[in-house]
């Protein structure tokens, strides 16, 4: 014989039956937190505050048992009994009560045969041990009891233990629950945050397994989905006063507008009180099921401004037919052995009921008149509109009843096989291991039509979404705004009243969402929810708000100025209407006019020594070729076509070869004339007569004509769109299909120019007062310098500026030739006629 932490308590509820199920409830609670004491503490010390909500849970169990006993199809011929004990929310008393229920005799520690028949009855214990316990109300006690009762295979069905650790069947094979695991709760809150686009959230949690695991699961659920936690504050039950102040200051200093709280309602109330003191009323709070339905906070007007708009996940609510009528019909006169009901009566009506011994309580309370009743009284105890934990208790009783029904309704009840643990049993011989096996397969349909089953230890994840809204009276009211059923998430957005007082969902972001035309760029060392908005590059767009990447436009398209849509590129070419085209056209026409003016001057003064001494025929031909050079540049301006692309390069190449050929022949003639003055060189002039000069020019020019003809016939330049230069415009250009042909044209011009430069350089010191070889040398130096600079400029220029570079090279070299060769002559002819004499020209 031994005792379990003192004598058994006398506060319980018992109903005899063929099968008795046990119940553990936290009916009383201590006014302040105290660690469990395993010393010889007097029974129920400090457990004096009766909690009405757990009292309703007890009667939900009693109602379910009585309802099952009236059911002719569920456990027919079997009376179900119950034995309910209070644990006061303290670990030692919970374990003592559980062992009392299982052992069946509070004075015996012999648990090897706990279910032997015992005819002894009493208030707190029946004679036989219970094969199943409904409860307890906390995860910590559930873990302890599951481990203690696990070797005995006694099933434990909790209605309020939510720790995910209890889902581990290898550690807790005898545990079941009718409330979802906290994993599903945290997942539902994560869905809410993702749906409402709350990217920047603060979190406060109680520093125990409940709070830590809830935050961990929440972070896992929102990972990679655009939700971040700005801060995580921990509060301890032992130091809640200081922790609540710290948490309130953190919430005030944070930029997050949405605050998630995983705490017990008493802790949350402390935090709200501290926030009210510092006037923080603009935060949107998200509640866990531990406090989302707390009437204690809802009715506290001092924190109503802070708590207004709370959105939370709550244990799913339901109704139980006839339960309200049952509660209103309770009366101590009809239940004389119910100590809980008697104490409730004294607390609510301020009177005492006569005990069965005929004596009155020692408390200074008047005796009840007998007319006191719960009928027609508005009281939280009789409110059954939204049953949550009570409905979980109701489900647990029905799950136990269905498992018992499955055991007792077998056809082989009289089987002699004693070793078969799954064989049918009589009500007095039910073994817990049988009940354990049948509970795992139970499928319950309640009288309300709800379908229920166990998934291992867990029940299907079902929650309510609730909202705390203001009322004209002052206290807040709780409104149902949606439901969560597994992965189905239903939220009535229009029914929500947010903390701002409107139906507009409050924003909570670290960085404002990037508008279309920009992309998100994460900040180094900061959470992914904190970012900068970077405009899309040219040719890229983003159509949606909050884009992570910019899309590249198709080849024929370009981004608009806002970088929000791809538009067709504009066709771009060097036209006569733009400034550059007008400038080049003016320069070309001016050069042609200047050349014509020189031609007229030379024509009028063709008989003067200056014109005659410089081979007037070649001078006129040179002026004609220069005019063609100026005019051929105009062919490059305008929209390219098939014929313009072919003609422009041919005109350019032939005009310049004709020009350089004239200069080359003039230089050769000058050299021949002065070489013929030497003895024995008279015959040299025969090779440079007028006919030979014309023939040489035609030959040199004909070579270029042949090159151009072959090039243009085999692989001529063709107009095409150039997409290489990324811009909002598509350049229309003449594409060189054959680089070899273009290179031969330029190369031949360069060959003649270099030859002419070399010969002119050799003749620069010939003894004449007016030596044209000097002018040709300067002109060819300018010509070569222009075209040497042209090659890299041509290659590196983008779009239509390629054409502009070539036109500039043509005009610059043409002006160089015109000015260097003809400007000095025109100066003498027009302004210094006294020098336009044979004597002056022939002077050394």
Image: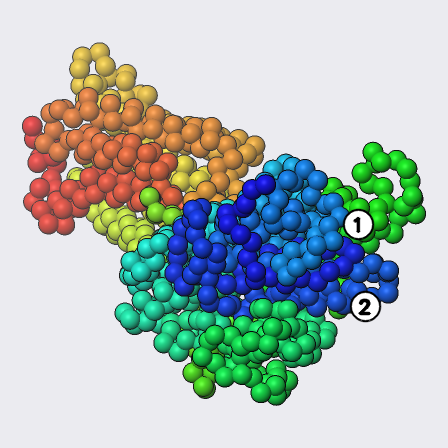
Q: Position of residue 675 (x, y in %)?
A: 20, 18
Residue 655 x/y as whole percent: 38, 39
Given residues 415 and 838, the one toward you in this image is: 415
**Lower sequence index among marks 2 and 1:** 2
Q: Is residue 403 left or right of residue 766?
A: right
Closer to the camera in the image, 567 or 75: 75
Which residue is located at x 70 percent, y 54 percent? Answer: 120
Total labels drawn: 2
Location of residue 712 in the rendering, given as x and y in whole percent from the top left corner: 53, 36
Which quadrant holds the N terminus?
A: top right
Give the SS element for disc 1: helix
Between the C-alphas of marks 2 and 1, the distance is 20 Å
Q: Is residue 207 visible?
A: yes
Q: Residues within 10 Å of mark 2 (few under 14, many from 20)?
A: few
For residue 428, the mark is 1
> In the figure, 419 relative to 683: above or below?
below
Residue at (10%, 50%) from the top-left corner?
831
Specify the quadrant that holds the C terminus: top left
**Which of 553/626 is in front?**
553
- Give me the disc on residue 70: 2
**Vertical position of residue 590 compared to residue 68: above or below:** above
User: What colour scheme does the image use?
Assistant: rainbow
Q: Can I make out residue 589 in this image? A: no
Task: Name the element at disc 2.
Answer: helix
Place of residue 765 in the rendered image (x, y in percent of width and height, measured from the top left): 13, 24
Q: Residue at x 50, y 63 (%)?
A: 28
Task: Pick out the residue farthest to the top.
Answer: 680
**Camera-side residue of 177 and 250:** 177
């Amino acid at each position: 014989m031994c005792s379990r932490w003192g004598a058994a308590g006398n506060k319980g509820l018992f109903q005899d039956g063929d099968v008795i199920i046990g119940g553990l409830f936290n009916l009383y609670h201590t006014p302040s937190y105290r660690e469990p004491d395993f010393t010889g503490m007097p029974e129920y010390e400090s457990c004096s505050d009766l909690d009405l909500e757990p009292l309703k849970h007890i009667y939900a169990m009693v109602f379910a048992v009585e309802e099952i006993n009236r059911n002719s199809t569920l456990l027919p011929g079997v009376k179900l009994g119950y034995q309910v004990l209070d644990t006061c929310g303290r670990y030692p008393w919970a374990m003592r009560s559980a062992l009392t229920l299982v052992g069946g005799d509070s004075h015996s520690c012999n648990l090897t045969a706990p279910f032997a028949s015992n005819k002894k009855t009493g208030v707190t214990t029946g004679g036989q041990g219970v094969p199943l316990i409904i409860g307890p109300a906390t995860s910590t006690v559930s873990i302890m009891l599951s481990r203690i009762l696990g070797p005995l295979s006694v099933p434990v069905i909790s209605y309020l233990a939510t720790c995910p650790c209890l889902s581990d069947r290898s550690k807790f094979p005898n545990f079941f629950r009718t409330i979802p695991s906290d994993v599903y709760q945290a997942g539902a809150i994560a869905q809410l945050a993702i749906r409402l686009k709350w990217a920047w959230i603060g979190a406060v949690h109680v520093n125990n397994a409940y709070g830590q695991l809830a935050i961990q699961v929440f972070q896992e659920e929102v990972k990679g989905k655009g939700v971040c936690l700005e801060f995580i504050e921990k509060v301890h039950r032992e130091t809640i006063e200081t922790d609540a102040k710290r948490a309130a200051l953190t919430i005030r200093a944070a930029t997050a507008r949405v605050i998630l709280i995983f705490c017990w309602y008493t802790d949350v109330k402390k935090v709200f009180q501290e926030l009210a003191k510092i006037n923080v009323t603009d935060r949107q709070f998200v509640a866990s099921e531990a406090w989302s339905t707390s009437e204690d906070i809802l009715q506290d007007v001092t924190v109503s401004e802070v708590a207004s708009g709370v959105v939370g996940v709550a244990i799913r609510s339901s109704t139980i037919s006839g339960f309200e009528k049952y509660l209103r019909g309770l009366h101590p006169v009809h239940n004389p052995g119910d100590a809980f009901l008697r104490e409730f009566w004294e607390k609510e009506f301020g009177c005492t009921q006569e005990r069965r011994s005929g004596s009155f309580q020692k408390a200074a309370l008047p005796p009840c008149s007998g007319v006191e009743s719960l009928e027609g009284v508005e009281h939280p105890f009789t409110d059954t509109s939204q049953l949550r934990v009570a409905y979980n208790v109701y489900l647990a009783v029905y799950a136990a009843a269905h498992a018992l029904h499955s055991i007792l309704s077998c056809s082989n009840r009289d089987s002699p096989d004693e070793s078969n643990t799954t064989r049918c049993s009589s009500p007095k011989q039910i073994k817990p291991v049988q009940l354990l096996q049948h509970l795992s397969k139970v499928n319950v349909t309640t009288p309300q039509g709800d379908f229920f089953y166990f998934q291992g230890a867990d029940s299907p994840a079902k929650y309510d979404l609730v909202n705390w809204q203001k009322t004209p009276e002052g206290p807040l009211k709780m409104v149902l705004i949606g439901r969560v059923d597994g992965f189905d998430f239903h939220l009535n957005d229009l029914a929500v009243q947010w903390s701002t007082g409107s139906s507009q969902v409050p924003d909570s972001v670290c960085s404002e969402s990037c508008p279309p035309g920009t992309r998100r760029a994460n900040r180094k060392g900061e959470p992914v929810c904190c970012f900068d908005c970077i405009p899309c590059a040219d040719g890229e767009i983003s159509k949606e708000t909050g884009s992570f990447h910019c899309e590249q436009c198709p080849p024929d398209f370009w981004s608009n100025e806002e970088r929000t849509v791809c538009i067709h590129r504009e066709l771009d070419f060097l036209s006569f209407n733009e400034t550059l085209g007008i400038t080049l056209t003016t320069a070309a026409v001016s050069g042609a006019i200047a050349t014509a003016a020189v031609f007229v001057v030379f024509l009028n003064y063709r008989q003067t020594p200056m014109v005659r001494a410089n081979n007037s025929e070649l001078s006129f031909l040179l002026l004609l070729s220069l005019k063609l050079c100026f005019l051929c540049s105009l062919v490059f301006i305008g929209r390219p076509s098939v014929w313009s692309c072919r003609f422009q390069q041919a005109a350019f190449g032939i005009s310049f070869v004709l020009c350089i050929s004239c200069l080359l022949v003039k230089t050769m003639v000058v050299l021949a004339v002065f070489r013929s003055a030497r003895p024995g060189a008279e015959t040299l002039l025969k090779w440079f007569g007028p006919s030979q000069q014309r023939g040489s020019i035609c030959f040199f020019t004909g070579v270029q004509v042949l090159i151009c003809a072959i090039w243009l016939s085999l692989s001529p330049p063709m107009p095409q769109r150039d997409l290489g230069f990324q811009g909002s415009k598509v350049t229309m250009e003449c594409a060189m299909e054959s680089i070899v042909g273009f290179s031969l044209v330029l190369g031949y011009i360069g060959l003649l120019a270099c030859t002419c430069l070399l010969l002119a350089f050799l003749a620069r010191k010939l003894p004449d007062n007016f030596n044209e070889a000097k002018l040709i040398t300067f002109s060819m130096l300018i010509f070569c310098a222009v075209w040497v600079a042209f090659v890299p400029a041509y290659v590196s220029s983008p779009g239509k500026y390629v054409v502009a570079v070539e036109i500039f090279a043509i005009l610059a070299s043409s002006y160089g030739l015109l000015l260097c060769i003809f400007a000095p002559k025109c100066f003498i002819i027009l302004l210094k006629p006294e020098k336009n004499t044979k004597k002056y020209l022939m002077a050394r």
